[in-house]
Amino acid sequence: MGITYRYYRDENDLALQYDFWKRITSDLPYAWKPTLAPKFFQGQKEFHPKARCFAYDGDEIVGYMSFSGKGDFVSLGYPWVLPGYEAIQDELFQRVYGFAVSDEYGGKIFAQRFRHQWEDQILYFETKGFEITNESELIGVSLSDTTVSHEAEFTWKVSSGFAFEEWASIVMANGEVNEVQLKMMEEYYTSVNFDFTVTFMREGEIFGIIGVTIREDTKFSEVVSFGILHDSEVHKEDMLCVLMKEAELRGAEMISFHGADIPEEHIRKKLKLRELTKDVMMVMEM
């Protein structure tokens, strides 16, 4: 019958997209938990059925590509395909990117991120004109490889989702972001499917917020958001010990952090944190 292609039809395709993403990325190192961005984009005025394209071999889905965007900015997905179907990637790319860059949609700035080890995906985007604009370190440890202990001089609570307002009050008090940056981060964190937040308190006052995701199928957890008041940095090691235990209790087997959040070498050594990968940001401007 050959390969057939179709664009988005209804909400069932969103579940199809999520299921295929998890399936195709389950063996990739340090693949993140699916975000909520596709779901949110579906409800935006910028959404168009041609933003999602699925490829079939008979009745079997063998590939898909999508994008989300706002204004002239486009987060361009990769043409994910099952092994053996690499020959259809360019067709998927042309169908989705071709629409995104068309006058009808008007995309001008295209971006996507990968992990450092995802060489095939990075190379493919380079052949399409993308350039690496930033690489940021991710450090972490297998939770079975470390035994953590702490003597906490604080209390903490664990909640589902992410406590953005409390986190924002910390980073604003630290002078780490301005109002414009905070708005951008709010939009981003809204798209992250957080599993839990740990809120740290001393004498009833909040001094730290950490938001975590856990990918259920691979047990890979990622600390996406990390906030601590500058005058409470002395508690960071004990906070991380608490966090790692809470993640393990929720099924995580590996935990990762943005390296910039834990620059202290003595903490990295004590908790056996090492570089796992890098976030690689790729951009192309028209």
Image (cartoon, grey):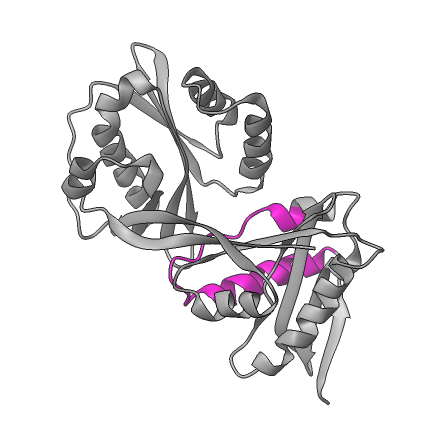
Q: Quadrant of the C terminus?
A: bottom right
Q: Is residue 74 left or right of residue 48?
A: left
Residue at 16% x, 30% y is: 150
Q: Which is more toward the observer, 276 or 239? A: 276
Residue at 60% x, 35% y is: 187
- Image location (x, y in percent) of residue 272: 18, 46
In the depicted structure, whether residue 207 falls above or below residue 279 = above
Regarding residue 115, the answer to whether it shows in the image is: yes
Residue at 69% x, 76% y is: 91
Regarding residue 253, the answer to whether it shows in the image is: no
- Image location (x, y in percent) of residue 65: 65, 65
Total number of numbered labels? 0
- Image location (x, y in percent) of residue 64: 64, 68
- Image location (x, y in percent) of residue 281: 50, 52
Q: Which is more toward the observer, 186 or 18? A: 186
Q: What range is drawn magenta here?
A: 11-39
